[in-house]
Amino acid sequence: MSHHTRRIDVGIATVSVMNVGDIEFRLSDELVIPEEKQDPAIAAQLEQPARFPTQCFHIALPGASVLIDACNYMRSFPPSSPYFLPGYQPPPDLVTQLGEQGVRPEDITHLVITHAHFDHYSGTTTECDGQMVPCFPLARCFLGRADWERSEMQKALQELHSQDRSTLGVLYQRRLLELVEGERELVPGIHIIPAPGESAGHQIVRIHSQGQTLYCLGDLYHDPVEVEHPSWMTSWADFNTNVSSRQALIQAALDEQALLTAAHIAGIGRVEHTSSGLKWKQL
């Protein structure tokens, strides 16, 4: 198995965390920090360029093979991307890393797209004989309806050569895409939970088995500093809904002593209460 993949058991479920490639940016360029919450001690740290993984997740259960997000690194971060790393050699792609675990594309039964930002669904299709086809041909795919119905998305789906048309549009045309409103049980122990804010249709996934729980958080957080400072978030997030989604997740995670994973926070962690507030503990 690639050293870019990490596995952990959650009851009878096996969760694999796969990094398909690093990106680089300064948190100070992405986060909006309320003026009254400014912290000079952290400001210098946020100004430094930092690397972040781009992670997808696989859950193996008897009778189900669930993928959370599907990123094609080279498609998401071409040289024109502000996150592009010149000279960087990314890890093996998502399909290869799945294959190293004995998982074939046709084995995937469910694919949850946490939200409609391209790095979370750029790997849902691939080119074959000049046409874009699903990478995971038997998977039911789940996207928040609010992301699908955005006017910008609907316009892009009509553009002949748009990225959205060649990915989500292909899934929709082949009747593989289901639009989710509210909570949805995929299989016993795996639930989609709405967590809007990063986008209107943003959703997270809860895995619960034999008394153990893990949440896959998508982009609810991008860095542990946002866990410790819940009002710090990206400029494009809706502040009130994002704060509400974060509060609900934190309360549940503390109550359940849950493990946490996020698309751009390396590995696996959990949240703990300390004398100074919430802290993200890397495991």
Image (cartoon, rainbow, N blue to C red):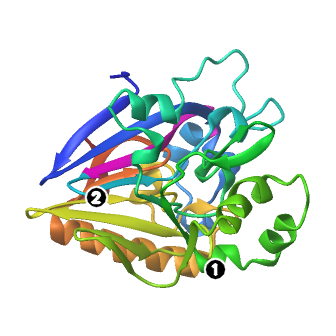
Q: Residue furthest right?
A: 160
Residue 225, position as x, y percentages in the image? 45, 51
Q: Amino acid at mark 1?
A: Ala
Residue drawn at 40 percent across, 81 percent down:
183
Residue 197 at least partly seen:
no
- Residue 51 colored magenta? yes
Residue drawn at 38 percent across, 22 percent down:
2
User: Residue 146 got which mark?
Assistant: 1
- Residue 132 colored magenta? no
Q: Nearer the viewer, residue 139 or 56?
A: 139
Q: Which residue has dot 2 on it?
A: 276
Question: Which circle, 2 or 1, is nearer the viewer?
Answer: 1
Q: Amino acid at mark 2?
A: Ser
State which region is magenta: 47-60
Q: Quadrant of the C terminus?
A: top left
Secondary structure beneath dot 2 equals loop
First along the sequence among labels 2 and 1: 1
Residue 227 at least partly seen:
yes
Residue 23, position as x, y percentages in the image? 62, 34
Q: Nearer the viewer, residue 30 or 77?
A: 77
Residue drawn at 68 percent across, 52 percent down:
118
Q: Quadrant of the N terminus?
A: top left
Residue 261, position as x, y percentages in the image? 36, 51
Against 18, is 221 above or below? below
Left or right: 63 as drawn, with respect to 39: left
Q: Name which quarter of the figure residue 116 lies in.
A: bottom right
Against 84, is 43 above or below? below
Q: Residue furthest left?
A: 210
What's the magenta bit mostly, secondary-structure-wise? strand
Residue drawn at 56 percent across, 31 percent down:
22
Secondary structure beneath dot 1 equals helix
